[in-house]
Image (spheres, helix red, strand yellow):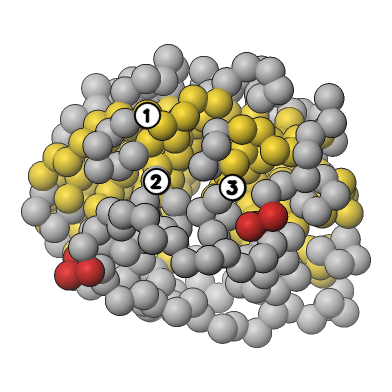
Amino acid sequence: MKMSSPNRSFYEDEEDDQGEVFLDDSDIIHEVAGDEEDLPDADDEDDDTDDSMHIFTGHTSELYSVACSPADPLLVATGGGDDKGFLWKIGIGDWASELKGHKESVSSLIFSSDGQLLASGGFDGLVQIWDASSGNLKCVLEGPDEGIEWVRWHPKGHLVLAGSEDKSVWMWNADKGVYLNSFAGHEASVTCGDFTPDGKTICTGSDDASLRIWNPKSGENIHVVKGHPYHTDGLTCLALSSDSTLAITGSKDNSVHIVNITTGRVVSSLVSHSDSVECVGLAPSSPWAATGGLDQKLIIWDLQHSLPRASCEHKDGVTCLAWLGASRYVATGCVDGKVRLWDCLSGDCVRIL
């Protein structure tokens, strides 16, 4: 079944939204501009040379999560299967702060948008909030009965959201260390989720093959997206458009779908992967999307026509990706342990790290 093209508002400016803002102006933290870093030269040779700037050796098992501070380009947080988290700085080998307290693997780490706080989620069902500058524990947030799958911050304040294996989603005020709301309705583990960039809506995806759209203030489940023509197997990942109108989701059913958040309707389907789609990302400055899968492919999509514009072959499954700012480059992480940088105009690999 052919879907209509994605919502027009994804590509063109919209009129100002006069709807209710979830946070009061007094609660909003100043926005932090992203770093403008030099992009790799497209003429760089592909090679396997180890040109790493720093190697951190504090962990004794595999890593599950890495986060970089938006306020300090040298500050990094890592968490892994050794039940430990660490704060450390690139190039400063004798400085590290252990994030103690989790009793099982540290599955998720993320800095708040202002870089002041760090949230860590573990398979022990706990979310811990840390002062990013000192590494001191501020509070422990409890609620979920099973492991934490992911953690996200509100884009304009110190509200933290987490999805759990126990089918629930929880929201807390991290400054006060208090519970605010929970969101129940999924029938399996909540594998992905986030606040929309305007902070007014929450989107969550689950192993039950559904996407749910929520009002964060009231807890109301606004839309449930499930069944034909949506996914037929569990969701693995989601990304939200910068104008807060569209959600793009990937699934174990090898497909990608784009949903209009306002209406809850599928507006486009991107079908080209032949194995589970593990990661998705929307380009910040163009109508493109990137998707990575266990079929060893990164696919760059032209969303205006719902067609692939480039397919980038890897030697193993693609598990994560990130657009490099507003550039045409995408970085991918692969099961073979390598990071690759891709030029999305040409589809060429320009660097292997």
The kind of residue tagged 1 is Asn
**Residue 352 is at least partly visible in this image:** no
Rounded to the nearest angstrom, the CA distance separating label 1 from label 3 is 17 Å
- The image shows residue 23 at horizontal and vertical percentages of 24, 58
Give the quarter of the figure containing the N terminus: top right
The residue that label 1 is drawn on is 221
Compared across the picture, whether 347 is left or right of 246 comes to right
- Residue at x 31% of width, y 54% of height: 20
Q: Quick one: 48 or 179, which is closer to the camera?
A: 179
- The image shows residue 198 at horizontal and vertical percentages of 41, 58
Relative height, residue 37 to residue 282 (above, below): below
Q: Residues within 10 Å of mark 1 (few under 14, many from 20)?
A: some
Q: Quick one: 57 or 190, which is closer to the camera?
A: 190
- The image shows residue 142 at horizontal and vertical percentages of 16, 35
- Residue at x 40% of width, y 42% of height: 202
Compared across the picture, whether 135 is left or right of 150 comes to left
Q: Residues within 10 Å of mark 2 (few under 14, many from 20)?
A: many
